[in-house]
Amino acid sequence: MPNSCPKCNEKNIVKSGIINERQRFYCKDCNYYFTVKKLGKQIDDYFVTKALQLYLEGLSYREIERIIGVSHVTVSSWIRKYNIKRPPHSDFHPVYKVFKQSELIEFMQNEANIKGSGIIITEFGDKYMMIKWERFKK
């Protein structure tokens, strides 16, 4: 139940039925009917942080959407909200792969897979994502 009326801020409110499956309230002081605002879907800060990290690493909004499972529009709004600026990556482009732990270990054991490029490994639940920078071929 809300603490006060959104119109007059008085605390003299009572329940007054249900409209569209939402509880309706009535303020006895100003005769105002209202419903409680719906809270938006809350996304764990872990996913926000991962999305921002991936953006900084050079991945596109849609690539981040496929990896994290959050809309590319949401990712875009987080980047605007936190005023994130991506540094220019002119000669390199990121390549990413998602591995189970055993696959990651096997991949890392082959020196040819890791030689001559920058690599970051980050956890995603029960899997690991490897981001590798490769030079654009000229």
Image (tube, grey):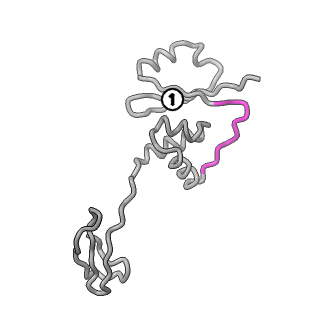
Q: Quadrant of residue 35?
A: bottom left
Q: Quadrant of residue 124?
A: top left
Q: Residue at x 36, y 62 (%)?
A: 38
Q: Is residue 58 left or right of residue 4?
A: right
Q: Quadrant of residue 5?
A: bottom left
* Percent of width and height locating residue 102: 41, 18
The residue identified by callout 1 is 121
Q: Residue at x 35, y 81 (%)?
A: 9
Q: Which residues are magenta?
A: 84-93
> Magenta span has 129?
no
Residue type pointed to by label 1: Ile
* Percent of width and height locating residue 32: 32, 81
Task: Give the quarter of the figure containing the N terminus.
Answer: bottom left
Q: Which residue is situated farthest in the bottom direction here?
A: 29
Q: Is residue 137 left or right of residue 84?
A: right
> Magenta span has 88?
yes
